[in-house]
Amino acid sequence: MDTAKYKKLFLQETSERLKTINSGILNLAKAGALRAEQDSNIDDLFRCFHSVKGMAASMGYEPVKLLCHRLEGLLDAVRKKTMNVNPAIIDTLLKGADMIAACLKNLSEDMPLDMDLKPLSDEIAGHQNIVSGLKPQAARCKEKKIEPQASLNLSKTIKVDAEIFDAAIADIGELLRIKSRISEAAKDTELTEDVRLLDKSIAGLYATIVTARTIPLEELTQNLPRIVYDISRDRGKEVDLSMQGIDIRVDRAVLDAAAEPLVHIIRNSIDHGIETPDERKRLGKPQKGQIKVEAVRERNGIVIEVIDDGRGIDSEKVKEKAAALGMSREKIEGMSADEILSLICLPGLSLAKEVTDVSGRGVGMDVVKKNIEAIGGTLIVKSEINKGARFILKLPLTTSIIKILKFSLNNRLFCLPLSKVESIAEIRMSEIKNTDSGISFLYRDTEIPIFDLRKIFNMPFKELRDVLIIIIMNVRSKTVGFLVDEFKGVVDAYIKPLPKILQDMKGVSGFTIMGDGSPVFLIDAANII
């Protein structure tokens, strides 16, 4: 049998089973002496390993099959009460799950399955002399006879590769470009209504595909308990992880972009934030540290908060480190408390006392911030000394196709994400106030800074008119204005990532193609601020 066409399905199914296996092992460790909970967890784990073993056998992946068989033997001994669950058995089961994951990685990269199973097999055999190849035990109950169904029914759920949805989104982006071109040509003709209906149909198709591409946040967070377990054990710390709101559905592309930042924040919380049990006892805190992941829906997106009850972030140390990196003392002292905490995202700034395999080299939080902002999100940091820290990730519900506001500078088109725009104001030159730090004007009783994008992009200076157009935006919880030549309307656009040669370009996060084929850069307002 040609198994090549089933390989992707095997990898997908086994990866999903592995998530259940990891969480099941950790639940087994928490169950302690509660026999009913142990039995339930063991039965679930046994079924998962058995399913993976069966799939591996049908595909001819012998090492995976043998590995699952030996882990089944270990679980069977616990189920039959010939041994008790203990930390050593939990470690062995976790090592087994890791080895299955390593096998999947090799298979996905078309590498041979030349895994050395002997060390783990010896470890399993060492648990009360359990050896591989034990004969299956007699079933504890009679096999239930299954009556044939009266009819055949197909499942209403179809598994589709995520790449197919990505391709469909790209096709819709091309449809939007073509529609834009048709719309220009159809102005003031009898085709205007047809263009409106075409726009409505494209919007409906996009909404359907995005809905199909959404997955629960739980898909992203399912492996977090294992990550917390491994790091806290390695650091000699005790940490409980709790999660809320993980049933919220989000575009898979957003979750892909948020995965690495979320893991890095949690690693830092354990490594830098949560104290050792002895430290916590001296401070009058519970022995176990707490990390919470809480998600809520907002009108235009999702907010994920990572909250720990550790030592918090020392603002004074952040100031010292920022000054050591070259930031002026005057600028630092003029910052708000939240702005000072955000400096931990400066490249090279680290508060770690020592370098570990997790953190401490000053790389990481700058990448976290960059990745979040690249998809139109925002990272906010809050903290209180000895009470903990909060990392707030504000993310859009979807990426790729967004509503953009077009504007011109020196007869060239640019765009901004509409979700960040508060309003567009026309003000007179006399309303502009010059300060040492730049220009500003009074907006809703508050003085807000104005950024001239020409200076930022080194464009030729243009004589300012008496009436100025300002795009007012909310960026990182600050209200700011951008000086532009002309407002050019709002459209739906497919945003593409910058090509590799332009990825270091400051102040730009992507681009779209207009109906006439011309590229238009998407301004990265957060980067400019």
Image: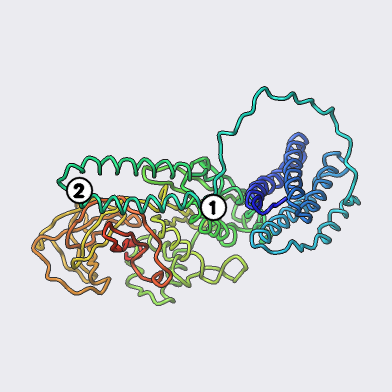
Q: CA distance from mark 1 to mark 2?
A: 57 Å
Question: Which of the two residues, 418 or 272, is positioned nearer the viewer here?
Answer: 418
| Residue 216 % position (x, y) | 52, 43
Q: Given this view, does label 1 or label 2 mark the residue nearer the observer?
A: 2
Crowd around label 1: few <14 · some 14–19 · many ≥20 (10 Å): many
Q: Disc 1 on helix, strand or loop? A: strand
Q: Disc 2 on helix, strand or loop? A: loop
Residue that carries the numbered disc 1 in the rendered image: 308
Q: Determine if residue 257 is in view.
A: yes
| Residue 43 % position (x, y) | 76, 38
Residue that carries the numbered disc 2 in the rendered image: 186
Image quadrant in which the C terminus is located: bottom left
Q: Residue at x 19, y 56 (%)?
A: 487
Residue 200 horizontal side relative to residue 274, left or right? left
Give the number of callouts. 2
Amino acid type of disc 2? Ala
Amino acid type of disc 1? Asp
Q: Determine if residue 419 is in view.
A: no
| Residue 178 % position (x, y) | 30, 53
Establish if 219 lies above or below 346: above
Circle nearer the N terminus (1, 2): 2
Residue 164 horizontal side relative to residue 204, left or right? right
The residue furthest front is 1
Question: Which of the two residues, 261 or 71, is positioned nearer the viewer here?
Answer: 71
Find residue 136 and report its image quarter: top right
